[in-house]
Image: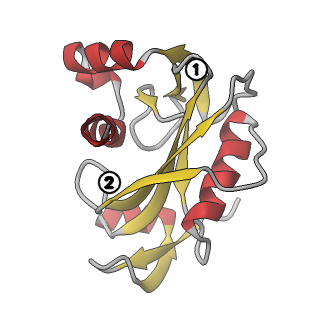
C-alpha cells in the first residue's frame, strides 16, 4: 500500500511542498486536517474512540470524524470524505464550518477546519479507524474532559474549549 501524500504548508496555510505522511509527522511539518462534530436532534454529540491500530493517539476519544487532507484536496471535500469513510455518513453538501485552528502542538502541526452537522445515525464505523462510538451530552463531555483529559485526543480538547467559548 502506498503511503498517503500530504501538502506541506507554511504559517499562512499556503502549500509549499508535498511529502509522505510518515515524513510529515516525523519531521513535525505543518499540514491540514478537518474535524467534524455530529450532533443529533437531542443535542448530543457523537464521539469516536480511535482504534488501537492508529499511529497517532490510539485508543482515545476524538471528534465524530476527522482526517488529513490529501494533497490537492480542499477542506470541505475532506470533511465530506471523512464522514463517509469513518462513520458511513454520506452527505451531498459540506457540513457547516465553525472555525479554523492554527497549526500547533495540540493539533500535531495541523491547520484544522472544524465543522458541525446534524444526524441521528445509526452509523457504520470503519473498523480500522474506530473501536467504538457513542452519543454524549455536551455537559457530559465537558465534565469527562475536566476529570480525565487523557481519555481524549489533544486536538479534540482544544476544539471543545474553543467550541464552548464560541457559544
> Which quadrant of the figure has residue 145?
top left
Please report the residue visible at 32 percent of the width from the left and 51 percent of the height from the top: 107
Residue wearing tag 2: 108
Judge whether 79 appears above or below 151 on screen. Answer: below
Residue 11 falls left or right of residue 51: left
Q: Secondary structure at mark 1?
A: strand
> Residue 160, labelled with which disc?
none
Please report the residue visible at 69 percent of the width from the left and 34 percent of the height from the top: 87
Please report the residue visible at 34 percent of the width from the left and 69 percent of the height from the top: 30
Residue 72 falls left or right of residue 160: right
Residue 27 at x, y = what percent? 31, 67
Kindly report the distance in space between the C-alpha atoms of the residues bearing marks 1 and 2.
Answer: 23 Å
Residue wearing tag 1: 133
Residue 3 falls left or right of residue 1: left
Judge whether 99 appears above or below 56 on screen. Answer: below
Q: Secondary structure at mark 2?
A: loop
Q: Residues within 10 Å of mark 2 (few under 14, many from 20)?
A: some
Circle nearer the viewer, 1 or 2: 1
Q: Does any portion of residue 3 appear in the rendered image?
A: no
Residue 86 at x, y = what percent? 66, 39
Residue 135 at x, y = what percent? 55, 16
Q: Does any portion of residue 130 appear in the rendered image?
A: yes
Please report the residue visible at 52 percent of the width from the left and 21 percent of the height from the top: 43
Amino acid at each position: 500500500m502506498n503511503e498517503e501524500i500530504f501538502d506541506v504548508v507554511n504559517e499562512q496555510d499556503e502549500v509549499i511542498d508535498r511529502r509522505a505522511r510518515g515524513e510529515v509527522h516525523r519531521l513535525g511539518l505543518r499540514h491540514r486536517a478537518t474535524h467534524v462534530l455530529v450532533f443529533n436532534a437531542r443535542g448530543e454529540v457523537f464521539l469516536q474512540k480511535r482504534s488501537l491500530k492508529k499511529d497517532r493517539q490510539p485508543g482515545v476519544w476524538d471528534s465524530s470524524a476527522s482526517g488529513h487532507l490529501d494533497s490537492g484536496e480542499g477542506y470541505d471535500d475532506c470533511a465530506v470524505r471523512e464522514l463517509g469513510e469513518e462513520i458511513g455518513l454520506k452527505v451531498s453538501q459540506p457540513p457547516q464550518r465553525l472555525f479554523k485552528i492554527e497549526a500547533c502542538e495540540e493539533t500535531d502541526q495541523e491547520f484544522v477546519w472544524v465543522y458541525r452537522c446534524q444526524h441521528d445515525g445509526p452509523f457504520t464505523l470503519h473498523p480500522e479507524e474506530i473501536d467504538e462510538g457513542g452519543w454524549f451530552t455536551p455537559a457530559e463531555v465537558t465534565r469527562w474532559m475536566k476529570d480525565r483529559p487523557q481519555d481524549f485526543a489533544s486536538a479534540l480538547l482544544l476544539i471543545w474549549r474553543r467550541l464552548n467559548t464560541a457559544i
